[in-house]
Image (spheres, helix red, strand yellow):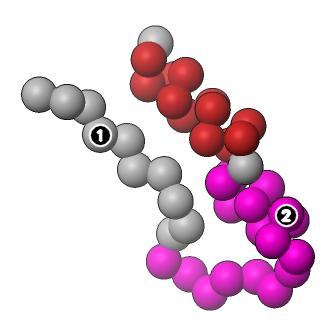
Amino acid sequence: PARLIRHGIRDEYSLIAPPTHLYKHYRLDAAGIEAPALEALG
């Protein structure tokens, strides 16, 4: 079986800001995606 990791925006109202700020806030930028991926790989 393959391991699945959910990573995305939680069920809440979004902030209003430029996209680059939102990516960082919601951990959808490169560093925010890298951290849980590395943690899952061990």
**Residue 36 picture location, percent across and down:** 54, 34
**Residue 37 picture location, percent across and down:** 51, 30
Quadrant of image for the N terminus: top left
Marks 2 and 1 close (CB-CB < 8 Å): no
Vertical order, 32 against 10 (above or below):
above
Q: Given this view, does label 2 or label 1 mark the residue nearer the observer? A: 2
Q: Where is mark 1, residue-wise?
A: 4
Q: Amino acid at mark 2?
A: Thr
Residue under the image location 71 percent in, 41 percent down: 30
Q: Dividing the picture into quarters, in which one does residue 19 lie?
A: bottom right
**Residue 13 picture location, percent across and down:** 62, 87
Tag 1, which secondary structure?
loop
Task: Report the magenta residues as a range.
Answer: 11-28
Q: Amino acid at mark 1?
A: Leu
Instruction: Measure the C-alpha gap from mark 2 to mark 1.
Output: 26 Å
Residue 19 counted in the magenta span: yes
Query: Which labelled disc corresponds to residue 20?
Result: 2
Residue 16 counted in the magenta span: yes
Answer with mark 2 or mark 1, whichever residue precedes in sequence.
1
Left or right for 41, reference 3: right
Vertical order, 19 against 14 (above or below):
above
Tag 2, which secondary structure?
helix
SS assignment for the magenta stretch, majority: loop
Label total for image: 2
Left or right for 21, reference 2: right
- Residue density around tag 2, few if under 14, some if 14–19, many if 20 or more, within 10 Å: few
Residue under the image location 81 percent in, 86 percent down: 16
